[in-house]
């Protein structure tokens, strides 16, 4: 099974949400549909801008907790390292 740590944003340099899941496409779809997380629903955070894949749940949990503790600037640098335009990666995942 695969596990994912992901970051959602409402826009470039906007609000950020860090989460973890074992079904990235479904979880992102739930965020986009405002089915889960009052925070993402109330702030309009729906764009998948970053994710990492893990084979072991404990590694994903550890990484999620690590990123959540980071300063905002560090999270932004992490996103921009692989996605400088902050494009919504959900579309790319669903096309594969």
Image (tube, rainbow, N blue to C red):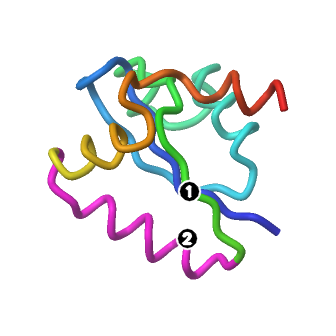
The residue at the point 44 percent across, 70 percent down is: 63
Give the residue at x 69% y 45%. Answer: 24
Q: Which residues are magenta?
A: 56-72
Provide the residue designation for mark 2. Answer: 60
Which element carries disc 2, helix, strand or loop? helix
Give the quarter of the image for residue 69: bottom left
For the residues labelled 1 and 2, say whether their Cβ atoms are less than 8 Å apart. yes
Residue drawn 31% across the image and 59% down it:
68
Task: Work out whether 10 lies above or below 63.
Answer: above
Give the numbered dot on residue 52. Answer: 1
Q: Residues within 10 Å of mark 1 (few under 14, many from 20)?
A: few
Residue 57 drawn at (x, y percent)? 64, 76
Secondary structure state at the residue bearing disc 1: strand
Q: In what quadrant of the picture does the C terminus appear? A: top right
25 above or below 21? above
- First-in-chain label (1 vs 2): 1
């Amino acid at each position: 099974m695969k596990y994912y740590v992901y970051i959602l944003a409402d826009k470039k340099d906007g609000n950020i949400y860090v989460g973890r899941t074992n079904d990235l496409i479904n979880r992102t779809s739930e965020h986009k549909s405002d089915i889960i997380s009052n925070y993402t629903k109330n702030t309009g955070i729906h764009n998948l801008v970053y994710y990492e894949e893990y084979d072991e749940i404990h590694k994903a949990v550890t990484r999620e907790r690590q990123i959540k503790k980071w300063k905002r600037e560090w999270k932004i640098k992490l996103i921009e390292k692989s996605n400088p335009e902050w494009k919504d990666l959900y579309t790319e995942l669903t096309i594969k």
